[in-house]
Image (spheres, helix red, strand yellow):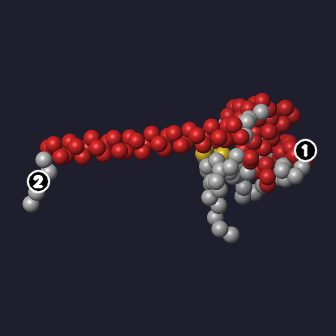
């Protein structure tokens, strides 16, 4: 029975470490290139950037997810702009958001309640622009949806 020598073990350790470091560096580089591609092909407007700040200030991620990140207490909002027809009639979708935010909390029995966020018309517009931007990002079908 052959024994693994110290030199052979050291060579396996260093060789494996270098191999996996190279793989890691390639994956980081690929992630950077994909993120850069999204940034260049889907630039974020000043309105959408303000909407992201509203998202963060109101801590929407405490309940909702966006691209699968955040709490899972309330629905994923990555494609909500499309759900409300924003791709066909942006003005109507924005009005729908405005009415939705104004009607909260809904006080519907048996449902989780979204708080009243007291958003100004400008905040609603900026949030709508942020949600429009998120809907345009190619998430490669993430997060996965259950089959119907």
Nearest the camera: 137 or 62?
Answer: 137
Q: Position of residue 125 (x, y in %)?
A: 84, 36
At x 58%, y 40%, the residue is 33
At x 67%, y 37%, the residue is 39
Residue 91 — which label? 1
What SS does tag 1 mark? helix
Q: Is residue 27 left or right of residue 93?
A: left
Q: Residues within 10 Å of mark 2 (few under 14, many from 20)?
A: few
Q: Tell me, yes or no, if residue 132 can be seen here.
A: yes
Q: Position of residue 21 (x, y in %)?
A: 38, 40
Mark 1–mark 2 distance (CA, rounded to whole Å) = 74 Å
Q: Position of residue 55 (x, y in %)?
A: 71, 36
| Residue with the most extreme bottom position | 148
Question: What residue is pinned by disc 2?
Answer: 3
Residues at discs 1 and 2 in contact (Cβ within 8 Å)? no
Say whether disc 1 or disc 2 marks the residue closer to the N-terminus: 2
Residue 76 — which label? none
Q: Is residue 127 left or right of residue 90?
A: left
What SS does tag 2 mark? loop
Q: Residues within 10 Å of mark 1 (few under 14, many from 20)?
A: some
Nearest the camera: 60 or 102?
Answer: 60
Q: Quadrant of the C terminus?
A: bottom right
Q: Is residue 2 left or right of residue 25?
A: left
Nearest the camera: 97 or 136?
Answer: 136
Tell me the mark number nearer the camera, choosing from 1 and 2: 2
Q: Tell me, yes or no, if residue 64 can be seen here.
A: no
Q: Is residue 90 left or right of residue 30?
A: right
Q: Is residue 106 above or below residue 146?
A: above
Nearest the camera: 69 or 100?
Answer: 69
Q: Position of residue 122 (x, y in %)?
A: 84, 32
| Residue with the most extreme left position | 1
């Amino acid at each position: 029975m052959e024994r693994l020598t110290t030199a052979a073990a050291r060579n396996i350790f260093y060789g494996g470490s270098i191999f996996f470091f190279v793989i890691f560096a390639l994956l980081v580089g690929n992630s950077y290139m994909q993120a850069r591609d999204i940034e260049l092909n889907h630039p974020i407007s000043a309105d959408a950037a303000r909407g992201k700040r509203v998202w963060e200030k109101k801590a929407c991620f405490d309940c909702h997810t966006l691209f699968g990140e955040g709490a899972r207490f309330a629905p994923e909002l990555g494609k909500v702009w499309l759900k409300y027809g924003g791709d066909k009639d942006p003005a109507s979708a924005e009005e729908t958001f405005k009415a939705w935010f104004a009607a909260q909390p809904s006080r519907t029995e048996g449902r989780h309640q979204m708080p009243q966020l007291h958003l100004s018309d400008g905040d609603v517009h900026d949030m709508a622009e942020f949600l429009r931007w998120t809907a345009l990002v190619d998430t490669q079908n993430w997060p996965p949806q259950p089959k119907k």
